[in-house]
Amino acid sequence: MPGTKMKRKLPPFKILSTTAILGYGFPESSFWRGIRKKPDLIAADAGSTDPGPYYLGAGKSFTNRTAVKRDLRMMIKAGVEKGIPVVIGTAGGSGARPHVDWCLEIVEEIAREENLHFKLGVAYGDVSKETVLQAIKEKRIKPLEFVPELTPETVEQSENIVAQMGVEPFIKLLKEGCQVVVAGRSYDPAVFAALPISLGYDPGLALHLGKILECAAIAATPGSGSDCALGILEEDSFILEALSPERKFTPQSAAAHTLYEKSDPYELPGPGGAINLRECTFEEAGNGRVRVRGSRFVPSGEYWVKLEAVRLTGYRSISIAGVRDPIMISKIDSILKEVEKRARDIMKISPAEGRIFFHVYGKNGVMGELEPVKKTLSHELGIVIETIGRSQEEADSLLAVTRSALLHFGYEGRIATAGNLAFPFSPSDVAMGKVFEFSIYHLMKVEDPNFFRTEIREL
Amino acid sequence: MAANQKKIRKNKKKSILQAARVIRSKNSGPFELTLDIMFKNKNYYELFKKNKIITARKIASLYQIPVSDVLKIVYFDPSQAIKVTIRRKIPSGSPGDTDIYGAQQHVPLFNIRF
């Protein structure tokens, strides 16, 4: 083209996503096939709020240590030896300080055992209570859909407040030459998109690719969260490629994944803006590959991050039992109501002090109040008796009394007078420990996307 | 007689299971449940889209929830899919919850007929 000088074309940027959640594993053959493609980045998302509030509150990972170490060892060893950056987001499953430190301990163990030396970047996702209280005062907090307004009282009760970091802290650490980055709570796509965005690739494409790669091969068909996937980012599109012969990406499988676990597939909000998919297309690219175009990033002007936290709501005990007697099954609702009343009378515990739940499988154990079938046709029921008290002891004793009241309850028409429940186990009761509930699920406006604490360690 | 005829007409309607390839539920965050219906082909999808067979009122009645608990209904052409998001009665993992991942809350959708 005479007279015009083309901007230097960006070469394809290859991202190897190893597994949907660090610790879910991946076949070695897929991993090495991915490495042979000479990726520019090896990355994995390590977390989710899906397993519920317990893990964030307890500071424990929902993934297994040995499994996480196995996945990390392969990624870090290959990454360090070949000079490919390795990025882990939402370390330890929930991404608060105890989770990140747990993951760092594993990384440091691997470095020692394999005699690897590298620069390790760490970004913590924690947000102090003071920061959130200040944000409430300055009206910089808004609840997500169906979530109550955030009060200072809720902040005080909350534990392990984290915010989903965007690409900025990753970029900062990668620019400082970190070979491995371990981050706390992260916006999943940022883990994959940060490096290419910093190199000038289109943020809409990079983030959309990240959104798909954070689930590794789940978006392929047959889908799998325990297999690797490769994303190839180009200037105007990206390609998805499966790394095991039994899977491929199809336009349908890739598009369908866009629906997964979100309320609006056209607009995916994240830190600092949203990915807009209204113009997005998915085309066959041959050899089980799909090309995606048209994903756009629309900055929101203001920078909002998503906060997450949980609070302790009590201690749980459970007992599992079965019921086979048809007379009892026909009266199960009134029996359970009466048993709860009796247990409360004996223990002198109000519903505010101790809670009793009967999960009645074979009736509405799965759907609870949403269950449209009101009358069970099942010939047997499984009952999980659950109590939540202010201490483990209180939960235990409320359970013991409820369980024995149900075992011996003399309901009307009863013929089997020896006992109402079949227990599969001795002991029948299990102390389950702390019960948490999500307390913060709000957006917070921040001035600086890099407000997260970062540090660099030389291993 | 009229009631009988109505019954016959109702029986002639087809189950959504004939038209859908995927019907599923899942958390969309701890406070929402999102329901996906992916159709077997474009014709079924367009039919459902054009005739607005799935409405907030229909979802509310299937799940016996107030219409205000139905957050949105989105038609997603690239997947020939309809996505419905409703409020979780109990947030994921809060006391009284029965399905932490929300993955088994899809069955009332099987009762949709067209």
Image (cartoon, coloured by chain):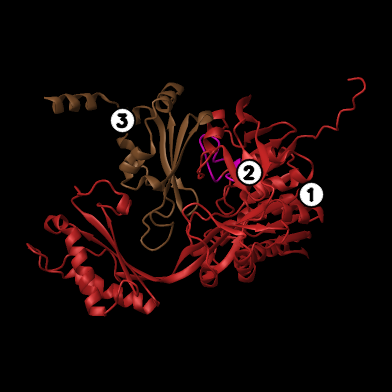
Mark 2 lies on residue: A274
The chain holding disc 2 is A
Q: Who is closer to the viewer here, A341 or A291?
A: A341
Q: Residue at x 26, y 60 (%)?
A: A383
Mark 1 lies on residue: A83
Q: Where does residue A243 sit, x and y in percent of width and height?
A: 62, 37
| Dominant SS type (magenta) | loop
The chain holding disc 1 is A
* Quadrant containing the C terminus of chain A in the rendered view: bottom right
Does the image show residue A30?
Answer: no
For residue A357, above or below residue A83: below
Quick check: A40 left or right of A152?
right
Q: Colour of chain B?
A: brown
Q: Is residue A220 magenta?
A: yes
**Disc assigned to residue B113:** 3
**Amino acid at circle 2:** Ala
The chain holding disc 3 is B
Q: Colour of chain A?
A: red
Q: CA distance from mark 3 to mark 1?
A: 57 Å
| Quadrant hosting residue A449 | bottom right
Residues flagged by tags 3 and 2 on a common chain: no
Could you tell me which secondary element the residue under label 2 belongs to?
A: strand
Residues flagged by tags 2 and 1 on a common chain: yes
Q: Where does residue A256 sit, x and y in percent of width and height?
A: 52, 35
Q: Is residue A326 magenta?
A: no
Which span of residues is magenta-colored? A210-226
Q: CA distance from mark 2 to mark 1?
A: 32 Å
